[in-house]
Amino acid sequence: MSNNQQEISLAEYEYDNVIISVANPDSAKHLVRVAQLITTASTTFHILNITRESSFPQRERSWRKGTELVMDTTHYAHRLGRPAEPFAATSSSIPGAIINAAKEVEAGLIIMGWFGTITPVAVRRSSVVNKVLKNAPCDVGVFKSRDTLEEVKKVVIPVGPSRPRPKRLAIVNRLLKQSNAEGELIHVVTPESGEDAGEEAQGSLDEVRELLNADKIKTRVIHASSVLQGLLSGSKAADLVVIGPGREWVFDRFLFGRTADNLTNRVNSSVLMFKGSEHRLVAWHRGLVKALTDLAKQPFT
């Protein structure tokens, strides 16, 4: 595939409208900055805050705080040179309101933040992020901030046995170009991977690098005792790590999969977890097939 053909393919994933769901003043501007890096100048940001229905005095106080946050974040987006519109609402269902807002503005992407440690219990209790991930009619980006994103110098993209999906490649491609950051594609080889795993991994990394049009992209095969340890080692110098869901995201116990969740918890950089829109039945089928395939590869003892 030529570079020109790939540019046309990646351009298909541009977003006209993006929902940015803000709830915490400490992370709201980070979410706008992430949205700026992975969208184009023509994308409209819809800055959303949902107040949960409650008693009138409490609802009034929450509404006032939410409105102030929305307006402050909207003005920040304007200062970054992006068209942005405030969107505040009251609802008995926060995830339902976010999904309805995405449908109303025909959003192609929802950006949300994750707070605290990712654990099976936390994922089950975080009905907002969990339900939006499962039911959103569009792509979803979950951002976990470690530090400011005013300057992104290095972006790490873990690559597994399967090539990353085109949407995530498009996101990474735009992110690298608009931040002018260095990108590094990494693949972890463990002792169980087999004799030719390193050579095969390098071939896969080279193939993905060719699909990306950014100038500053390196590849690295990391040999480690476990995939998680290798990913942590490879992400040490990163400002941002961009990951996609593993097959386990379809289960309530995981946000994006055991390895991805553990990496997000322990890495020192910020993490963007990106999931392209997909019909739930398709996702479950793909996850089940992958699980059975992995099981078949396990040696019998």
Image: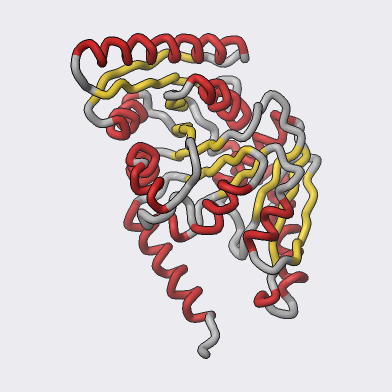
Residue 254 in sight = yes
Q: Position of residue 178 (x, y in %)?
A: 70, 29
Residue 137 in sight = no
Q: Residue at x 53, y 9 (%)?
A: 75
Q: Quadrant of residue 97?
A: top left
Identify whether 170 is placed above or below 249: above
Q: Position of residue 268 (x, y in %)?
A: 67, 42
Q: Quadrant of residue 174?
A: top right
Q: Is residue 10 left or right of residue 23?
A: right
Identify whether 198 is placed above or below 159: below
Query: In front here: 4 or 64?
Result: 64
Which residue is outermost to the bottom?
A: 301
Q: Residue at x 61, y 65 (%)?
A: 161
Q: Residue at x 55, y 15 (%)?
A: 77
Q: Is residue 282 left or right of residue 161?
A: left
Rendering colour mode: secondary structure
Query: In front here: 122 or 28?
Result: 122
Q: Position of residue 119 (x, y in %)?
A: 45, 50
Q: Position of residue 236 (x, y in %)?
A: 73, 47
Q: Residue at x 45, y 40 (%)?
A: 139
Q: Quadrant of residue 34?
A: top right
Identify whether 232 is placed above or below 75: below
